[in-house]
Amino acid sequence: MDQREEQEFAAYFVARRDAVRRMAFLLCGDWHRADDLAQTAFVALHRRWRKVRDKAALDAYVRRTLVRAVIDESRRPWRRERQVENLPDVSGSGPELGDAVATREALLGGLRRVPPRQRAVLVLRFLEGLDVAAVAEALGCSEGTVKSQTARGLDALRAALGDALDDLRSAS
């Protein structure tokens, strides 16, 4: 790449790195893995930067690369090991903060229990705000698949949240 293209990529990276990292975290539930996955997506974009004709589609390309990386990683045998969850200590904080942290942790814990493809659909639909067509394009599947994965993912999330809320209630 020439210097102008490097500067364009650097500007895009600086503008979007936090949003991509946040989306990666929502997809995988771990900040360290999110950093690795975001880096994977940006490296893939950097390799193809010269070939990208529609700079308005950069977000879609990065999103699709990120989702594919999360799903591919979840298929690796070592990734199937049980993860240990570290809940933050909020003792001494106000009750509102404790409730907010508990609710957030319950949601993230619930998302971790949803299968990767369904989790990707839920994150893209409800946390990234994409419509069915945009999610289908990002995942490379039909709109019907997005709808069915959304329904199944919501069912799995409801079940997981019920378990997580029961765990939180019994711990307090």
Image (cartoon, rainbow, N blue to C red):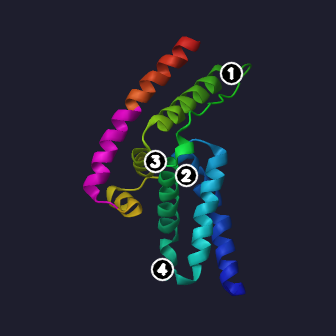
At horizontal 53% and vertical 36% (from top left) the residue drawn is 108
Residue furthest left as drawn: 144
Picture residue at 47% right of the left edge, 17% below the top:
166
Q: What's drawn in magenta, residue-wise?
A: 141-157
Please, what is the three-letter code of the amino acid marked with disc 4? Asp
Mark 3 or mark 1, earlier in chain: 1
Q: Quadrant of the C terminus?
A: top right
User: Distance of mark 3 from mark 1, alpha carbons?
Assistant: 29 Å
Give the tally of numbered discs. 4
- Residue 30 magenta: no
Q: SS at mark 3?
A: helix
The residue to which callout 2 is attached is 23
Q: Secondary structure at mark 2?
A: helix
Q: What residue is shown with label 3?
A: 123
Vertical arrangement, residue 126 with respect to residue 130, above or below:
above
Quick one: SS at disc 4? loop
Q: Are marks 3 and 2 in contact (CB under 8 Å)?
A: yes
